[in-house]
Image (spheres, grey):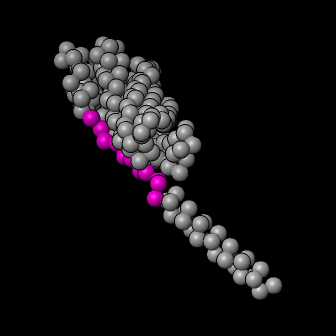
Amino acid sequence: MGPVKFMWDKQMRLNIVFALGSMVMLSACSHSITLSGTGASASEVMPNRIIQTPTQYSYTQDLTNASKSIEPESASCAAHTYKLSIGPGIKETLDAAISAGFAKATETHDGEVMTAPYNMRIDAEDISARISVIPRMFSSRVEAHVEITGRVDVRDAQGTPAARAMIYGEGTESADGGCFNAETAIHLAGDKAIRRLGTDFVYKVINSNILH
């Protein structure tokens, strides 16, 4: 029984070491990505379309706290997970567009009563992100795709709808180097999606001449 017990103890130790090693590896392969906003969409505002009516606006918590956990589609990157925090970047981008396109805009907190001539609420409808790995002869290439859909609802002081719009932005980018460089591809794709969302907001809400 002595040799058998020794072999069993040895196997148990190996299993424990393997399990601990796997936990360390998995924790080391968790990536956090936070996107910043851009003011590029503000330059798309047409000077003769700037909205002069006093406006209050708010973002829902679903938008400001928006994030997405991304698991690669390829089994070769199964040990990697990516947490994309995109809400702050969306808010910064839309803040810049509103500042450029509304002459008298005041932000309020979500849930507060708004009583201005125009009251605008901005919500995140859907956020999706995915990663695919493209194998090559000597290395692999990672492609990331990010899509953002938002909803804008503007009402007058009596609660009557003044404007409604769905805004959309998407971005696709790739990076060499496999799983560890997927973070770069996600960051670039997310930046592009946010920038396009801001531009879509400008064209549909400000430049459309629906609001005055």
* Residue 7 point in image, percent of width and height: 71, 77
**Magenta segment includes 34:** yes
Determine the residue positioned at 55% across, 63% down.
23
Determine the residue positioned at 71% across, 82% down.
6
Q: Quadrant of residue 162?
A: top left
Determine the residue positioned at 24% across, 29% down.
40
In the image shown, does 47 or 33 lie closer to the viewer? 33
Left or right: 97 as drawn, with respect to 86: left
**Magenta segment includes 83:** no
**Image quadrant where one finds the C terminus:** top left
* Residue 46 point in image, percent of width and height: 21, 17
In the image shown, does 111 or 165 lie closer to the viewer? 165
Q: Can residue 17 be spotted in the picture?
A: yes
* Residue 199 point in image, percent of width and height: 31, 23
Determine the residue positioned at 30% across, 13% down.
209
* Residue 116 point in image, percent of width and height: 34, 30
Query: The magenta stretch spans which residues?
Result: 28-38
Vertical position of residue 79 compared to residue 59: above or below: below
Q: Quadrant of residue 10?
A: bottom right
